[in-house]
Image (spheres, rainbow, N blue to C red):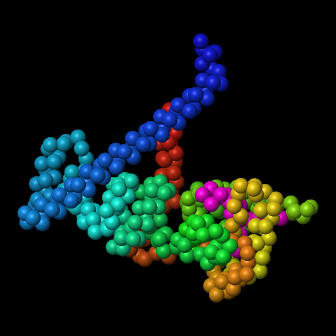
Amino acid sequence: MRNDLDNQTYKEWLVSLKAEISTAQSRAVITVNQELLKLYWKLGEQIVQKQQTSGWGSEFLKRLSADLQLAFPEMKGFSRTNLAYIRQWYLYWSVLDEKVPQLVGQIPWGHNRLIISKFEDKQAALFYVEKTIENGWSRAVLAHQIELQLHLRTSKSINNFEATLPPLQSDLAKEHLKDPYIFDFLELGEDAKEREIEQGLIEHISHFLMELGAGFAYVGRQYHLEVNGDDFYIDLLFFHIPLNCYVVIELKAKSFNPKDTGQLNFYMAAIDGEIKRIEHNPTIGILLCKDKNELVVEYALRNIDAPIGVSQYELTKALPDKYLGKLPTIEDLEHELIESTENKSSHLE
């Protein structure tokens, strides 16, 4: 009997079964969160209505908190402070589209509290709600992206995508480019050389992928291409899953030079000719430079037929004094990543 349980059929079935159980657990967590947020939305709505129609003041929340905690001692979330947040959360979002409650209900309560505490601009807040859903960010990662002002850096790269890509692919490509990219996790000085930055990015690949954004899969560094007997080496090569294409990234530790686009254009053509499959979309190029003259970049890209985006990178990010010491450290983010991985692994046991 034991031999039968050791055969390949059983092992393959067990792997499939574990995956199904893990998926079911994840769905259960999502469902519980969504039901909790639905409850919070109705509770916030009723609190506001009662205060408006009955004239109940701040003591009302204190009384309500005590009564709800007495009635539901096993439930968390009925403290006076949290009831005040629920009220604030409802007032914050209720002025927008009726679809917003379903959207914000897809992210944890702690994420919701963080977002509404950071933004008066509701469109900026919605940006982080949508990015959290898209990327599955932990609260520490969400806080990090907010403090680095991701919403002001997305879709800011100078590129020729509209002229070189179909509309849908062009829009998607622009959404995945930033300007500047911030590599503060490298802890390098502004005079760092290209190879030092490149090596650091690969040594901190999880942080690099986080900064690149969702969909990037790492292929290689100094990726070797042989073209009719000649050897070439691409700084960084990725594959972007939603765009279904290779992405060549060239790193320049200097100001933008129009000559750089020629080199990048060649590498993209070589990737398309040597390793791209027929089902893949044309390769996209990203040139990362220390700084740039935007008009020079626009002229350099104007007559290039290959899709290229040009962005700056920053090795450090200057923050206002009020934010210093409040960002999660590299160690915090690494802890979040390890903890998340362990939690996923435990679901399969």
Q: Seen in the image, is 303 located left or right of residue 333?
A: right
The reply, left or right, for residue 315 in relation to residue 115 is right
Task: Please report the residue visible at 44 percent of the width from the left and 61 percent of the height from the top.
Answer: 130
For the residue pair 194 and 143, the one nearer the viewer reads as 143
Viewer-proximal residue, 337 or 151? 151
Where residue 134 appears, as percent x and y from the top left, is: 48, 57
Residue at image location 64% in from the left, 68% down from the top: 166
User: Above or below — where is 218 with respect to 21?
Assistant: below
Vertical relation: 18 (above or below) 96 = above
Q: Quadrant of the N terminus?
A: top right
> Which stretch appears magenta?
232-252
Apparent side of residue 218 relative to residue 130 in the rendered image (left or right)? right
Residue 340: image location, x then y, percent: 49, 47
Residue shown at 29%/49% (left/top)? 36
In this view, 37 is above or below 89: above
Secondary structure character of the magenta stretch overall: strand
Image coordinates of residue 75 in percent, x first then y, are 24, 44
As for residue 241 lying within the magenta part, the answer is yes
On the image, the x and y values in percent for residue 343 come to: 47, 42
